[in-house]
Image (cartoon, helix red, strand yellow):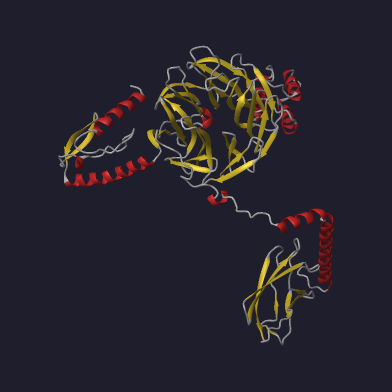
Amino acid sequence: MSWDERLRLSRQKLNRVQRLPHGDLPALGRKAECPEPLYARFPEPGRYWALRGGWPKPVAKATSAKMAAASSSDSDCGRAESNEASSKWLDAHYDPVANIHTFSSCLALADLHGDGEYKLVVGDLGPGGQHPRLKVLKGPTVLTESPLPALPAAAATFLMEQHEPRTPALALASGPCVYVYKNLRPYFKFSLPQLPPNPLEQDLWNQAKEDRIDPLTLKEMLEGIREKAEVPLSVQSLRFLQLELSEMEAFVSQHKSKSIKRQTVITTMTTLKKNLADEDAVSCLVLGTENKELLVLDPEAFIILAKMSLPSVPVFLDVSGQFDVEFRLAAACRNGNIYILRRDAKRPKYCIELSAQPVGLVRVHKVLVVGSTQDSLHGFTHKGKKLWTVQMPAAILTMNLLEQHSRGLQAVMAGLANGEVRIYRDKTLLNVIRTPDAVTSLCFGRYGREDNTLIMTTRGGGLIIKILKRTAVFVEGGGEAGPPPAQALKLNVPRKTRLYVDQTLREREAGTAMHRTFQTDLYLLRLRTARAYVQALESSLNPVSVTAREPLKLHAVVQGLGPTFKLTLHLQNTSAARPILGLLVCFLYNEVLYALPRAFFKVPLLVPGLSYPLETFVESLSDKGISDIIKVAPERKSLAF
């Protein structure tokens, strides 16, 4: 029995139970996590009642202890039911030990057999990155499983041709190859073209082939090429540099007759409609490679239709439009920038510079939503203009698009490190889903025969499947918005008065004279400031010593309201490495106006770079509010404040 048939049968049974004349049962939805004792809801209160085959049947006679335990269980289940009733999602399946380790780019939903039953394609990295596999899930069970030669980089489904039956093909990027499957059987393998090797590296291996160079010299020369050459070394040379001295000779004798091959790998992949914008239109594959290139493949012949260069290695791709008409391609790269390319462009047209590394790229309508390692979401236009920023409560692990076709809703989903999945439309929080473990991959779409299914995999390898309720409506303001609502309100700007218009005309007519007056006043201010500084230097009233003999800096702070004040001196040695010993500090003041308990004391050793606070008290003796300067004289240099 399929998963959907079991769901349909459970709904029918639930409807029959809800029509019982004995009482009302709580609506359990599509999942009954805690089968509750229903003895209090039926005429015989001394028995437990449970759902068996869709009808309530007595299970066992209840004692008082069991009745009390059952009542507490009733309350727990009631709370769970109330939470589920207020939630927009139905819990369809949760397996904490599903052993699925993947990312959002390696998940895809498609009707692989053309029977209307959508399946989940998973490019599984395996535990610890070992034993990667391709898995196809039907419902909660694994339908097929096959090993992969390398770690998967991305998975995508696309239509290759218009012939009937319209079954999509599966493309899986792994290493330097794209494996194409039809009807879950291998159909085609596309390999990236080889790159020209480094000529110096080729010459060294030719010398090793003719025994004109020893392995130790070969290693030294290859290390020099790796540090300075722009063209990277081949895999053969890099593997040779990792060997011990005892293993080098055997490696050279085994591989010296082989030709040098330099092969790049695929870092990301997506699909691009070829000539129509329909959902079931033929699509091209867009590949991002390690050698900073973007390749567009023909869906039938698998030849390269277009090649574009980037300043850095692409890690996330987003495409809109059609290849034969017009398209925009956004690529988030490892250098922290997002480059936007258009049709027939060999180089990026726009560049978005981020302050941190990107962790996800999703296009919502015409807005590019980027997640960064600074725990924030950013919205940009296709020309690179920043629209908004929303701060997240935890680090962003993964991102994907939520598209509800029935309501025309597009939103971005962000899986956080604190076990939350947040759904945003622009900068407005629509919904928060809390999971038992941190989510590392997200996928939303049609699964089985359910249109709106959310599939999540956790950090520990678990699988969570949730179904969006048909009555669920995402309302703006249901969660916490980033900026306050008052920020979006328009200010009530007053109308322009006659005085404002006259002043504007005056500034327009006399703009040159006003600017010259401003510049004259600015120059006078700078001149007076320079004269005051020179006077402070000449009278030794500056807080910084100008001689190399006493490299000191003095800063004074006065605290209190009077008549007693606290005077704190911060003394700092500004020399690079020479400490100051035996420094004496004395206060010079008017004894008629002030009284100090300590007017002379010795300063301890001053270490370079550290600030030393020296405290004393000052008492004002005048009752007329007269003030005067108190000078501080460290050694023979007088500093004032």
* Residue 457 image point, x, y percent: 46, 33
Q: Give the answer, above or below, for where 275 lies relative to 358.
A: above
Instruction: Give the number of callouts.
Output: 0
Q: Left or right: where does residue 110 sit relative to residue 285?
A: left
* Residue 469 image point, x, y percent: 39, 34
* Residue 119 image point, x, y percent: 44, 23
**Is 396 in front, or is 145?**
396
Residue depicted at 20% across the width and 45% down the height: 67
Quadrant in the picture for residue 521: bottom right
For this orientation, the residue located farthest to the front is: 498
Residue 243 shows in the view: no
**Is 197 in front, or is 289?**
289
**Is 494 in front, or is 306?**
494
Residue 617 shows in the view: yes
* Residue 219 image point, x, y percent: 71, 29
Q: Give the answer, above or below, for where 65 lies relative to 295.
A: below
Residue depicted at 75% across the width and 57% down the height: 502
Q: Left or right: where does residue 523 sit relative to residue 249?
A: right
Quadrant in the picture for residue 597: bottom right
Name the image quarter holding the N terminus: top left
Quadrant in the picture for residue 243: top right
Residue depicted at 71% across the width and 26% down the height: 346
